[in-house]
Amino acid sequence: ETGVTQSPTHLIKTRGQQVTLRCSSQSGHNTVSWYQQALGQGPQFIFQYYREEENGRGNFPPRFSGLQFPNYSSELNVNALELDDSALYLCASSLVGNTEAFFGQGTRLTVV
Amino acid sequence: QQQVKQSPQSLIVQKGGISIINCAYENTAFDYFPWYQQFPGKGPALLIAIRPDVSEKKEGRFTISFNKSAKQFSLHIMDSQPGDSATYFCAARTIGNEKLTFGTGTRLTIIP
């Protein structure tokens, strides 16, 4: 186990709704990154948070947003859900400047 | 733009054999290359990683071979076991940038 925990593990939402996913980073890690993994694909970088600020973003629209808290935990928020948002959402924590990133087990989001 | 290309998409190897997965990259700024192992319903787990100043790194049955001039790297799994059956992802990152760029994955099946 990596020490990175995500909640919930599974979630079903209706198109147009909003969703919040949560991540607790590994002890001592100050950077959190979020990835979207569609079925049969590799993870795609959404964004990263460091010192409670967004520090890099992938090719995702503004309806994907996030937060990082003083204890380094993080949230991913997705507004106006679309069917294509159905995926496994992964959180990874790391120590800034350290190359190793450790992933949580993910949250499986299904949009119907 | 896919910056990391991975092959094959799927691979079947007999128990005890050598499994080989290949990746090629385009961005010459990449200088950290990890491999991740992912089991169904789980997040990716860091397996082994290499930096381009070495041509090979070995950890147990897992070896990364790196060819900087060809911009290619590969994962070799020696004495493959049924427990190695999983999806493997190569990835790349620029030091100082926490974003990982993943390949599309290889589903490895080890048969008795």
Image (cartoon, grey):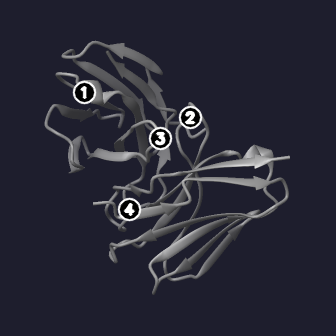
Q: Secondary structure at mark 4?
A: loop
Q: Give the residue number, with chain letter if any, for mark 2.
A: B42
Residues at marks 2 and 4, CA–CA distance in whole angstroms: 26 Å
Left or right of residue B1, residue B20 in this image: right
Judging from the image, mark 3 belongs to the subunit labelled A
Q: Nearer the viewer, mark 2 or mark 4?
A: 2
> Which residue is more in the foreground, B56 or A23?
B56
Residues tagged by mark 3 and mark 4 found on one chain of the structure: yes
Q: Amino acid at mark 2?
A: Lys
Q: Is any part of residue B52 visible from this angle?
A: yes
Residue identifier under label 4: A97
User: Taking B90 as reference, is B44 above or below it?
Assistant: above
Amino acid type, callout 1:
Asn
Residue beneath label 3, please?
A40
| Residue A17 position (above or below residue A93) | above
Residue to which mark 1 is pinned? A77
Q: Real-space Cα distance between discs 1 and 4?
A: 26 Å
Where's residue B82, x and y in %?
79, 45
Tag 3: residue type?
A: Gly
